[in-house]
Image: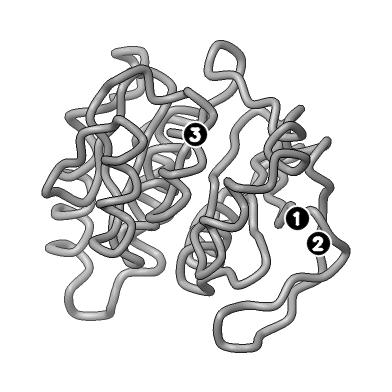
Amino acid sequence: MHIAILTFEGFNELDSLIALGILNRVKKPGWRVSIASPAARVRSMNGVVLEAQASLQAACEADAVIVGSGMQTREVVADETLMAQLRLDPARQLLGAQCSGTLVLARLGLLNAVPACTDLTTKPWVEAAGVTTLNQPFVAHGNVATAGGCLASQYLAIWLIARLEGLDAAISAIHYVAPVGEKEEYVARAIANVKPYLDVPAATR
């Protein structure tokens, strides 16, 4: 099971790395989470440099993909050569987008006119792309989910784990990273944001 987190130049660390950390709480043979980038290295909005663990081609072949956010997303969607490499398909993949990553999915035509979540800065650009935005942190329609606000990246991670490994695995992962002394209420709130949008077999609920 390969989950790729698309991470572009100028990326937001919270968007890519929170999801990376939570997703890696699943300890199962074959479970792999990768930072996927168009270059060997990418620099964050605050100067943190990451080495890519996977290519864009590998991400397009992954079982699930999160499109991360960053300061240069409008440049990403304006790059026709780069966008042409993003052959994502919700018929065979779980797709998530974080903040301005929603703009990428919108420009790829993958939101199918359904409402989506994004951050407040990106909201007008997403709406200009023909997508209605919601005043909430997370929403999913079938195999496509979007989240708005940096810390909403946890909801994408929870959704992916629940879809791929079941709700119990998602609860375990978020419980591990939740603040001490607040774990029960933190987990309850996180799951409440995601559970209405889960499309998982009844046995795993």
What separation in Å lies between label 2 and label 3 (alpha carbons)? 24 Å
Q: What residue type is labelled 2?
A: Ala
Where, by quadrant of the figure, is residue 149 drawn?
Answer: bottom left
**Residue extending furthest bottom?**
47
Residue at the spot of label 3: 107
Secondary structure of the residue carrying numbered label 2: loop
Q: What's the residue at 58%, 46% (across, down)?
A: 77
Which of the two discs, 2 and 1, labels the residue nearer the N terminus? 1
Tag 2 near tag 1, CB within 8 Å: yes
Residue at the spot of label 1: 37
Label 1 packing within 10 angstroms: few (<14), some (14-19), many (20+)? many
What separation in Å lies between label 2 and label 1 (alpha carbons)? 6 Å
Residue 45 lies, in percent from the top left, at 56, 80
Which of the two discs, 2 and 3, labels the residue nearer the N terminus? 2
Secondary structure of the residue carrying numbered label 1: loop
For the residue pair 97 and 104, the one nearer the viewer reads as 104
Q: Which amino acid does label 1 sit on?
A: Ser
Any part of residue 1 in sight: no
Label 2 packing within 10 angstroms: few (<14), some (14-19), many (20+)? many
Q: What's the residue at 73%, 81% (across, down)?
A: 49
Secondary structure of the residue carrying numbered label 3: helix
**Residue extending furthest right?**
40
Q: Quadrant of the C terminus?
A: top left
Residue at the spot of label 2: 52
Residue 91 lies, in percent from the top left, at 55, 11
Residue 14 lies, in percent from the top left, at 46, 72
